[in-house]
Amino acid sequence: MGACCSCFDAITGGKHSGESSQEMTTRNSARGVPPASHGLSRAMSAPTISIQGFKVSGSGLALTRIPVEQDAAYWEIHVSIPGQTAPSGDEDGDLQDVDVNDDGEEDPYAVKFGVATRKDREFYRSLETVEEEGDQASSRDDGTFLMRPISNLRHGDVIGVALQQSDLPMIQILLNGEPLLECIINRFRGTVYPAVYMPAGAGGEGERVDDEGMSLNFVFDEDEFKEMSPHARFGPLLVAQGII
């Protein structure tokens, strides 16, 4: 009877099965395999990007380590520009002086938000070669095809990104809680990562010199969100935990 109970426990996920999973997890820890966690990917981001924790500055493309694998996810990017104060609200508490580039002409200093596919050092070397030859890379070539630009960002602005894989639009971008209809992306394929693109001079004043002014902070913790997602089905981006 004891042997039968042991077999039953293993089949139904009882104590014997649980002990086996624990042993596998312990072995992974002993091998030095770190658990997956949120953060910015140094390997997939441009060499010209500076990464400090969840904060990025500098110029170029920056990708996170964790891909979007769940059906619907939401995350935020908080804008910080030293020397500026957060926009004041009107009587209803809404932010004013929000400016989105919708005149049909692309602002070369507009920061782009959205997602990007996996990148590597070879991608950035190829991009550098194109620029050295005097050519201008298209959005498909520079990694920003699944991103949209927002101009004239202010200190304290909150960019929300809502992604869903089973309905349209697949990617929505919000500015201070308001959806930007001109920034939706209807479809995409493949594995994607939360990403931003910071052009040289973004957040600068006057002649837009390449300064250290603007920084962007990725926020994945729901308790730290400043705005609401567009729908309850958009939960915070989850880290897929698997046993290797």
Image: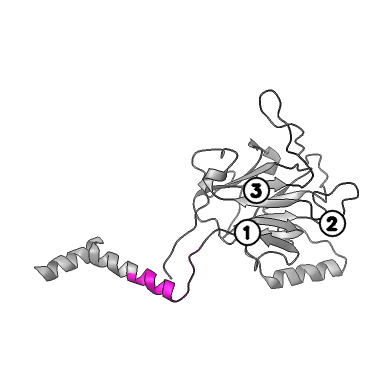
On screen, residue 207 versus residue 27, left or right, reads right
The residue sitting at 8% across, 68% down in the picture is: 1
Residue neighbourhood size for the residue with mark 3, other residues' Cα within 10 Å, grouped as few (<14), some (14–19), many (≥20): many
Question: 223 or 165, which lies in front?
Answer: 223
100 w.r.t. 4: above or below: above
Tag nearer the camera, 2 or 1 = 1
Q: Quadrant of residue 131?
A: bottom right
For disc 3, the marked residue is 77
Tag nearer the camera, 3 or 1 = 1
Residue neighbourhood size for the residue with mark 1, other residues' Cα within 10 Å, grouped as few (<14), some (14–19), many (≥20): few
Question: Which quadrant, please, contains the C terminus?
Answer: bottom left
On screen, residue 85 versus residue 11, left or right, reads right
For disc 2, the marked residue is 210
Q: Position of residue 81 (x, y in %)?
A: 76, 47
SS at circle 2: loop
For disc 1, the marked residue is 53
